[in-house]
Amino acid sequence: MGNDPDRDLVDRLLKAGVDQLEDADAGRLLLSELSAGRPIEQLRELLQSDNEASVEIGAFVAAKLGPATRAVLADVAALLDYPNTAVRFYAIEAIEVSATADDGDIVARALALVNDPDDAVRWRAHHFQAAIRGGQ
């Protein structure tokens, strides 16, 4: 840490949870930088982190990144069983914006969350289901 500003941002997010507002700002900065060409593999570190706050930020970024998220889709799909409601919510959204016809198994797993115990996750899964029915 200290020599590589790109690495510093990822390291900061891997230690997330101390200041949620600051973490959210760093997450938005990462989203902006990934959209501008930062290697998406750095997002994988957040998605696979042992730190729940880091995983949540990573899932949020994946959901907002759009089709580029497909490069880490397997990592996102692994979050569909994550205990944190927000992580599952964002994972469904990330799958919705990045999955293709080749990802039927992952899409089916996301849609199965229409039976999730949490209202927000069920809503997100129903929204995804409606988008598929609507041809989006």
Image (cartoon, helix red, strand yellow):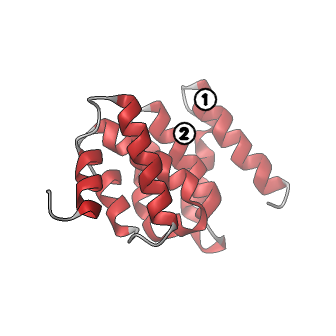
Q: Is residue 129 left or right of residue 51?
A: right
Q: Answer above or below: position of 93 versus 56.
A: below
Q: Is residue 89 left or right of residue 49?
A: right
SS at circle 2: helix
C-alpha distance separating marks 1 and 2: 7 Å
Q: Position of residue 25 (x, y in %)?
A: 43, 41
Camera-side residue of 109 and 26: 26
- Residue bearing mark 1: 120
Q: Position of residue 29 (x, y in %)?
A: 44, 52
Q: Answer above or below: position of 121 versus 93.
A: above
The mark total stands at: 2
Q: Position of residue 28 (x, y in %)?
A: 47, 48
Camera-side residue of 22 and 92: 22
Q: Residues within 10 Å of mark 2 (few under 14, many from 20)?
A: many
Residue 96 visible at all:
yes
- Residue bearing mark 2: 89
Q: Amino acid at mark 2?
A: Phe
Q: Are marks 1 and 2 in contact (CB under 8 Å)?
A: yes
